[in-house]
Amino acid sequence: MTMTLEARWLICPGCSDLVFRAKYERGLRVCPGCGHHARLTARERLDALLDPGSEKPVETALQADDPLGFTDTRPYAERLAAARAATGMREAALCATGTIESHPVVVACLDFSFVGGSLGSGVGELVTVAAEKALAERVPLLLVTASGGARMQEGALSLMQMAKCSQALAQLDEAGILTLALISDPTYGGVAASFATLPDVLIAEPGAHLGFAGPRVIEQTIRQRLPEGFQTAEFLLARGLIDAVVPRAALRRTLARLLTAARPDAAGTSGDGRAPVPATAGLVRDPSALPPRPAWDVVRLARQAGRPTTLDYAGLLLEDFTELRGDRAGADCPAIVGGIGRLRGRGVMLIGHQKGHDTQERVKRNFGMPTPAGYRKAARLMRLAAKLGLPVVTLVDTPGAYPGLEAEEQGQAWAIADNQRLMSGLPVPVVTVITGEGGSGGALALAVADRVLALSNAVYSVISPEGCAAILWKDAAAAPQAAQALGLDARELLRRRIVDAVIPEPDAGAHASVSRTAERVQEAVWRALDELAALPPDELIEARRRRFRSYGSPSSEETRWPITAT
């Protein structure tokens, strides 16, 4: 029989254009014109995310229906019966074990078509059992959310599910197990204020709404019209509350990259169980091997706009790098970037300053000068690395922390101090490379490390030469003289043991040969991590603290650990 026009075409709920139904369904209900993402059922979600044939349901007993005997315009028991008949589900969530591109995972997926995906005792139990399954099997937990909030018909029992699910995720944190959330539209109320926003990484579909109170409630309460795009994924990303907005077609690949890189044991093999390191240009540990140069010339090279940035290095050093964004407190500072990737097979957390190359990007990135939100983002990522057992690699290139009014109001000094304290006690290897400018506390906040390396044209100082000249010489024009006096170049830093080794830059400098510079940085970082990997956490922390305790202390023994000669 010939298919009717209505059966072959549909109207997109986003742009109201006619869309060919078959193409729409093949695209997982994403409009090919406007990109609107329509809702999927929990069954459709699992089919789209898990490898075919890998799914095994996670079942559990649920409490008796309708604990309060609740009735509004119809009895609650009737609502449940109707939802079950319409969806074929027992409750508003499906839970399963499976794999995503061969990576094992436990998934708890909510379904908005079942009583609005609301959080009642049944959903709370299913999510908690899924978390306990992930804990028992020590595999990552993925939560796919779609909910209008807590289920009113179950009263305070529904409210208690928020704490129940939250403590289940806390146990996964304590066990060092990765948790992920995929936010779909809509996610509100008790789900948003518990297990939807607690995972380590929050990914949202384009246009998905996430918040505690819905727009209607907010507008009625404050008597104001909300801004365009309020509570959408894009709105939240700009405010540092989620990590990424990912189109539906790219979700599996994105999740697989995260699952791969988050494994601390993801490394190649050689005779000693680690990937072989090719022999390229070696590190310099003897300051006499570096020619003396005017410090001001080095400062100018360190500031060269063409020098590779952290994002350049991320693309050249790492495989499957996934940027993670936001401080989870309302901001995402673009002057610091970070994320998970694989360095020659080993999962690492990369964090660094981001200046940019041209004027437009440098303005956008605040010339690499972080606000408190940048340091808090870095701290969040370092804590995640510690949880997962991933080494931390930081790349330093900043004139200094941003000295503006808002930064001071938001606690710049507190954020910098907190990062130093945090890094001093990280139970994972930490390697820092000064790639350009190492400006004052703004640089040190990412450089309390087990190994501190510097590129040969990098600088590291308590203050900029201009600032020093203005204060002590009373003349900013004395900056070259101040630079020389500050001993901020790689040769002096190595001589004073501020850095452990220098990475020689090829040719005219890093800006003239980005790929070769990246190769040398990769090798140096790999060698440092390879040495540190054998040390237990308590020894790492003790040695790191001895290192920084020794500076300026004549009674301290030599504590800097030399990099193995190449």
Image (spheres, helix red, strand yellow):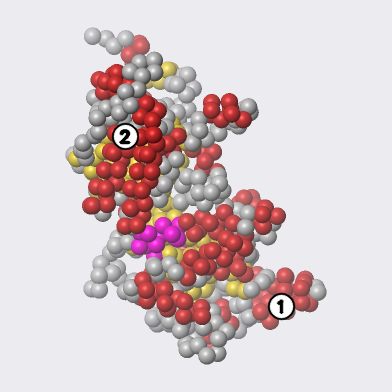
Write down the residue under mark 2.
121
Frontmost residue, 521 versus 463:
463
Q: Residue at x 29, y 21 (%)?
A: 77
Q: Quadrant of residue 220?
A: top right
**Tag in front: 1 or 2:** 2
* Distance from Cα at disc 1 to Cα at disc 2: 67 Å
Q: Residue at x 51, y 68 (%)?
A: 421
Residue type, label 2: Ser
Q: Residue at x 68, y 60 (%)?
A: 403
Q: Quadrant of residue 90?
A: top left
Percent across and percent down for residue 466 are 72, 70
Report if the CB atoms under discs 1 and 2 are less than 8 Å apart.
no
Mark 1 residue element:
helix
- Residue 427 in view: yes
Mark 2 residue element:
helix
**Sequence-wise first label, 1 or 2:** 2
Q: Which label number is shown at residue 482?
A: 1
Frontmost residue, 549 versus 289:
549
Residue type, label 1: Ala
* Magenta part of the chain: 381-391
- Residue 384, magenta (yes or no): yes
Say left or right for 324 vs 355: left
Q: Residues within 10 Å of mark 2 (few under 14, many from 20)?
A: many
